[in-house]
Image (cartoon, grey):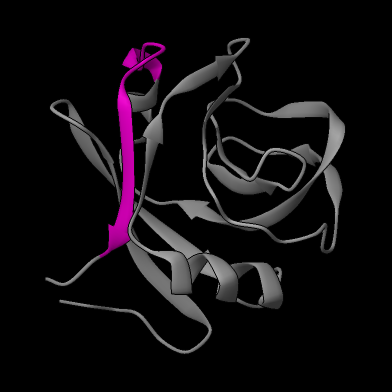
Amino acid sequence: MNTSSVSRKHLILEIRGKAKISCDLKRHLSPRTVGTIMRSLPLEGHAHLLGKSISYFETSVDSGIERSRTEFKKGDVTFLPSTGSICFFLNDAVFAKTMTPIGKLIGDIDALNDVKSGDVFCIYEDTA
């Protein structure tokens, strides 16, 4: 069942060959950035790790900073404009660079703990 709406888009974050995690992008958090990302789907890239708190992948999405923050909770999904990266928080964290909040992971996010550098992330709209 597709539960997407105008303000919330239900996506799947796939760790190729390993797991699929449900994810919601929330337009009210950062309308311009979420709109740009939605128009760019599907997105794919190699996983990178930043300490034990953040997994991310670089995209070609170009959107400036919007409603920036530096403190994030486990499960938050953010956009880092300087590299066009979509970031997933594995733990609560304070990050040195400001990021744009764009959504929340709503599935079993512990699967992200098994991600290795070079794994392939793919994010796409849930069509079920």
Q: Nearer the viewer, residue 111 or 83?
A: 83
Quadrant in the picture for residue 61: bottom right
Q: Magenta stretch? A: 113-125
Q: Residue furthest bottom?
A: 6
Q: Position of residue 4 (x, y in %)?
A: 35, 80
Q: Residue at x 36, y 11 (%)?
A: 116
Quadrant in the picture for residue 82: top right
Image: 109 above or below 86: above
Q: Residue at x 39, y 17 (%)?
A: 113
Q: Nearer the viewer, residue 117 or 75?
A: 117
Report the number of discs.
0
Q: Residue at x 71, y 61 (%)?
A: 63
Q: Is residue 10 left or right of residue 84?
A: left
Image: 106 above or below 125: above
Quadrant in the picture for residue 103: bottom right
Q: Position of residue 64 (x, y in %)?
A: 80, 59
Q: Residue at x 41, y 86 (%)?
A: 5
Image: 31 above or below 81: below
Q: Is residue 87 left or right of residue 18?
A: right
Q: Is residue 68 left or right of residue 28?
A: right
Q: Quadrant of the C terminus?
A: bottom left
In the rendered structure, does residue 19 fall within the stretch colored magenta? no
